[in-house]
Amino acid sequence: MVEEGGVDRGSGGAAEAAETLELWLLQAQKLVPLALGKAMEVKVFPGRWKMIVSKLEQLPSRLSDLSSHPCFSKNALCKEQLQAVLKTLKEAIELAEFCLVEKFEGKLRMQSDLDSLSGKLDLNLRDCGLLIKTGVLGEATLPLSVSGCSSQWESTDYSSIKELLARLQIGHMESKHRALDSLVEILKEDDDNVLSIFGRNNVAALVQLLTATSPCIREKAITVICLLAESGSCENWLVSEGVLPSLIRLIESGSAVGKEKAVISLQRLSMSAETARAIVGHGGVRPLIELCKTGDSVTQAAAACTLKNISVVPEVRQTLAEEGIIRVMIRLVDCGILLGSKEYAAECLQNLTASNDALRKSVVSEGGLRCILTYLDGPLPQESAVGALRNLVNSVSKEVLLSLGFLPRLVHVLKSGSLGAQQAAASAICRVCNSPEMKKLIGEAECIPLLIKLLEAKSNSVREVSTQAMSSLMTFSQNCREVKRDEKSVPNLVQLLDPSPHNTAKKYAVACLGLLSSSRKCKRLMISYGAIGYLKKLSEMETPGAKKLLDKLEKGKLRSLFSRK
């Protein structure tokens, strides 16, 4: 995978290559004073030649540093760097000779040639320094055993991969392009092992290639960066090396491939709250929103997910709203291309409405509540949409809520939704059942047997919110009677009297059982399932209502004993 001119790693070839390098080094060291002497004699274009002289004067120390590196004779990069320096020196001597006799094709042409020479010297100096300072030479010549790669990867030459990564940092753009081509091909075959080799300097070089003038180079660079982002191994390096502005520009004006890879990269990077804030700071919200409107299925879903990730951060939610995110997310919930886009949009709305009354009102005024309720008609209602519904139920009147079909959707979620969706539905019941009329309607909708079933859930938080909903509904006598009739209600509630600190449903279970304690049958069931033992511990813990319920059960137990005698 190394470009032509790479060093033969056989023993004979290595010795020959080392000898050749030494000869080229000597040649370069001889040409520097010659080029300097001629350059200093030139009288025309004094400003340009003064700059060229200052750069030629820096070359000896750079060549000395390079040649003293222990890996100097083992690396093809040194050979190519010396070749580049020799070529530049010969060009400097040639141009100086033309200027000394003032024999050249027009002043403008010579000025352009001198500027080009100055740029090449800059590149030579930079690359020589980079080879030493960044450790590229040592990295590119490490043996396979140092790499930490598995023995299964022996078919790929580790040194060649490191050399390719080094080439992303040095040389002219055409050379970097060739290295990038080779790297993309290798990644297609074995991306995990190759990605594991990347260092910060390699990441920085890739990020810089995102600003190349060639669209082809930008596409290949973003392809590799996307793989790095998805691997999760270089996220901090990518962000610290300034990848975010380039990704946002690609989303705004890149090719179709560039946009897709850029937004997928942002999707992964935005999982960090700090990076999410940075994306907003760099002006990334508007391009992402635009992609939600106009993108294909993949880019739309990735953009929606990125915005969902950003909306997790409370302090940027108002900015998101000002950029028009609410209307776009409502539209996605209604007619997103993929189911994933709809779910991301629903979760984004859930985040936006979590703690901000103004944003809740905005969602309602844009038709968001109706849209979410319609979305819940699907076969497996998801937590995000029900969570958004829960956040919005108190932002409209109960009459409006009922007219939109709130109760049938609530029952559907409690029957068919995911466990998280069922928990959010129970939480919504807690928020809306603040009047006898609403409690009556929820009971008549047959929610109570579904809540009793949820008391058996493995999740403590699901049990807690379901018990809380029941304790509120049961203050309406008709609902309380329905709970009494359900044979699973008392056993399930008694189990939730467990005094363990992990059981956060116990105070609501005490409240529910207290409401059932007027029934002699229910009291006998409570006693038979061991409620007294639990209540004694809860009374010691001063759990509200536990002492009163314990007294009732113990009196009932005494009466039962006397009646038997």
Image (cartoon, helix red, strand yellow):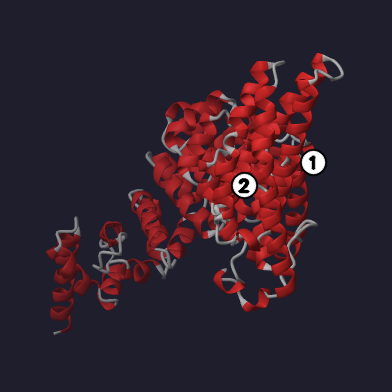
- In this rendering, the answer to whether 529 lies above or below 193 is below
Foreground residue among 211 and 113: 113
Q: In this rendering, does residue 410 appear at all?
A: no
Give whichever of 52, 215 is nearer the camera.
Answer: 52
Give the side of residue 150 with respect to residue 236, left or right: right
Residue at (67% x, 57% y) in the render: 22
Residue 493's image quarter? Answer: bottom left
Q: Are marks 2 and 1 in contact (CB under 8 Å)?
A: no
The CA distance from mark 2 to mark 1 is 34 Å
Residue 342 in picture, x, y percent from top left: 65, 44
Which residue is pictured at 78% across the width and 37% down the height?
Answer: 215
Q: Position of residue 366 (x, y in %)?
A: 59, 27
- What residue lies at 56% left-to-right and 25% top-to-bottom? 365
Q: Nearer the viewer, mark 2 or mark 1?
A: 1
In the rendered image, which quarter contains the C terminus? bottom left
**Image quadrant containing the N terminus:** bottom right
Quick check: 523 above or below 180?
below
Q: Which residue is mark 1?
A: 216
* Amino acid type shown at disc 2: Glu
Secondary structure of the residue carrying numbered label 1: helix
